[in-house]
Image: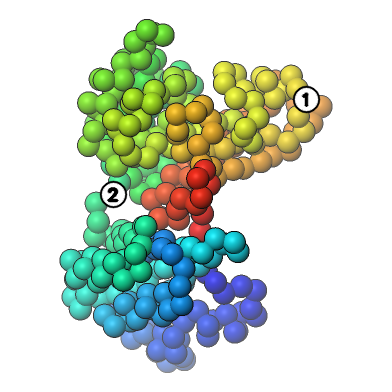
Amino acid sequence: MSLLRRFSPQVQLFTKRSFKSLKFPGESLDEITSPSLIHGIHVFHCPDEVGIVAKLSECIASRGGNILNADIFVPEKNSVFYSRSEFVFDPVKWTRMQMDEDFLKLSNMFNAMTSVVRVPSLDPKYKIAVLASKQDHCLVDLLHGWQDGRLPVHITAIISNHDRAPNTHVMRFLERHRIPYHFLHTTKENKREGEILNLVLDTDFLVLARYMQILSGNFLSSYGKDIINIHHGLLPSFKGGNPSKQAFDYGVKLIGATSHFVTEELDTGPIIEQMVERVSHRDNLRSFVQKSEDLEKQCLAKAIKSYCELRVLPYQLNKTVVF
């Protein structure tokens, strides 16, 4: 994600590091690195004007921080500015509280719509709840991603409209890691949304891991935070139930998965991530579904990771900027 692109290895080495960080013969690694430096991320979205990058750089450098990379996007016909910066700093010289104050001043200076700073090693992990139905593939992949440390989240609960037996792989995993499982039987008349809401009020965002229920507009407004969903297919194609069979019957040659934010209108929320894979006449329905499920797992995990790393920003009415 660095702005640096396709330089020769030697040039890339000098452009990505300061001269102080270069290792010369006879130096030990301890002599050239500072264990006291930690990593921070800042995202910014404001009306575009001259001098924003300079002020962002000054804000970080004035406290002894060093920018590792920065991504910037200014739409051609829309006078708005988007940026995402990664930097290192000494928390003794630049405290977490002071950092928030400094970036708040910057936000006020440029009338920012979004200004978020995150220090992964100091800030709490995002708290999420996962909603799932009968299909396990996305849920299992998220649980293992969390266990392996690939997903920087804290899972507070699994909520499902499907009752799983105690001896299943999922239930044994949840019991071993003390993650609560809430089975809430739903009907057309009662989606149990009030109970779900009570279980997720303390979360930072929700993940729908093939949750086959439509959340109402009242639930979305009451929850008031982001909800990430996964859908088989390149939206807006093959909406609704059993999309894999829809696509198989249609004879598509390219399948995909889309991870998007949930809105009141079904499967039309801003897209975070999409992935594709080729299929052919040699695929039967079983192999077709397997390929689809693999894409769904990868796509959802990447969307969650991008969201937690502050790579996703709103753009226009129904789009996203993903750095």
Visible in this render: residue 65? no
- Residue 118, how many percent across, how many down? 31, 60
Give the camera-side residue of 177 and 275. Answer: 275
116 above or below 69?
above
Q: Earlier in the sequence, mark 2 or mark 1?
A: 2
The CA distance from mark 2 to mark 1 is 43 Å
21 above or below 68?
below
Q: Residue at x 28, y 30 (%)?
A: 222
* Circle 2: residue type: Lys
Identify residue for label 2. 125
Q: With 259 as the anchor, is 64 left or right in this view?
A: left
- Residue 18, how many percent across, how many down? 44, 86
Q: Toward which corner of the image does residue 148 lie, by quadrant?
A: top left
Q: With 62 as the anchor, is 286 left or right in this view?
A: right
In the rendered structure, find residue 251 and report the number of the disc placed on it.
1
In the rendered structure, find residue 5 and report the number of the disc placed on it.
none
Q: Categorize mark 1 by other alpha carbons within 10 Å: few (<14), some (14-19), many (20+).
A: few
Q: Toward which corner of the image does residue 235 lie, by quadrant?
A: top right
